[in-house]
Amino acid sequence: MNKKDVPLYVLHCLEPIATLKDNRVLIEKNDNILLTVKDADPKSNFMFQVVSYDYSNGESAFRVQYSPKSDREISANSQIVREGYLMEVFNNWISRIEEYNNVKSIFDDPILNAFQAEFYSYFNLKDESLDDIPFEVEQIIKLDYLLNRVETRLIEMSDDSNRVVIDSIILEIEYVRENLATRSQKWIAENVSKIYAQIAKLGSKFMKEIWVEGKKEVIIEIVKTAIVEGIKYLSQ
């Protein structure tokens, strides 16, 4: 679908969502749907879609579908949204994603969270304005190379006792690699840190083989140059 296949009015209505820079979600293109927004958590199936638009009898309306339906139901919901109410429905949905991200539960893993926070600190992203800044091409290439090496090493170290966990980590690595060129420094740092946290939980052997090298690469090869380039970007 080309944007000139869509009424200009619709493009203006969708623009606040289509241009949204938010680490909680991913904006995806779908040829058969006007707009798709997915929860950025790779383990989540939550999404918000603007499926179609209708203009009749002088009134505009969007068909949307999203999940979770509410704070009481995780099933999908489909509804017609009248003119002027699209952003209200979307903001309610994204607020629910934020609540999921922040609520404490028995499903949380404090050890995993501690490892993730430690690795994230190596990226040294202290300027909140860097939320909207991508890594430079050179840093993206280095991160992709690093993650590719991690994936290869995990495959080599896989056995019957850890294969299920490693297969899950590899899927997350591939997901992050696919998004290196389109996401902010913060999103990348958060998701790479999640990967290394899961690797650390596999045990000291994996820490020595993979964590230490990852820390060195991030600090020496990626972060220093990224910070310099980020300052240049902000000064433009």
Image (tube, rainbow, N blue to C red):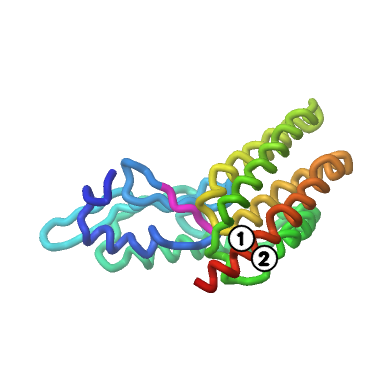
The residue lying at 27 percent from left, 58 percent from top is 11
Q: Is residue 152 left or right of residue 53?
A: right
Along the line of sight, the residue nearer the viewer: 188 or 217:
217
The residue lying at 77 percent from left, 52 percent from top is 112
The relative height of residue 46 versus residue 186 in the rendered view (above or below) is above
Magenta segment, principal secondary structure? Answer: strand
Query: Percent x, y for residue 131?
Result: 57, 65
The residue lying at 72 percent from left, 55 percent from top is 108
Residue type (three-letter) at the residue carrying disc 2: Leu
Q: Quadrant of the N terminus?
A: top left
The relative height of residue 210 versus residue 67 in the rendered view (above or below) is above
Instruction: Answer few, some or many: residues within 10 Å of disc 1's Cα (few below 14, many 20 plus, some between 14 and 19).
Output: many
The relative height of residue 163 versus residue 129 in the rendered view (above or below) is above
Query: Percent x, y for residue 138?
Result: 60, 50
Along the line of sight, the residue nearer the viewer: 135 or 44:
135
Displayed quadrant of residue 186: bottom right
Q: Which residue is mark 1?
A: 186
Instruction: Give, as a single range, the part of the protein colored magenta.
Output: 24-28
Instruction: Answer few, some or many: residues within 10 Å of disc 2's Cα (few below 14, many 20 plus, some between 14 and 19).
Output: some
Residue type (three-letter) at the residue carrying disc 1: Lys
Q: Is residue 219 left or right of residue 43?
A: right
Q: Secondary structure at mark 1?
A: helix
Circles 1 and 2: CB atoms closer than 8 Å: yes
Along the line of sight, the residue nearer the viewer: 131 or 172:
131
Query: Percent x, y for residue 160?
Result: 79, 26
Residue 91: which disc?
none
Q: Which residue is mark 2?
A: 125
Query: Percent x, y for residue 38?
Result: 48, 51
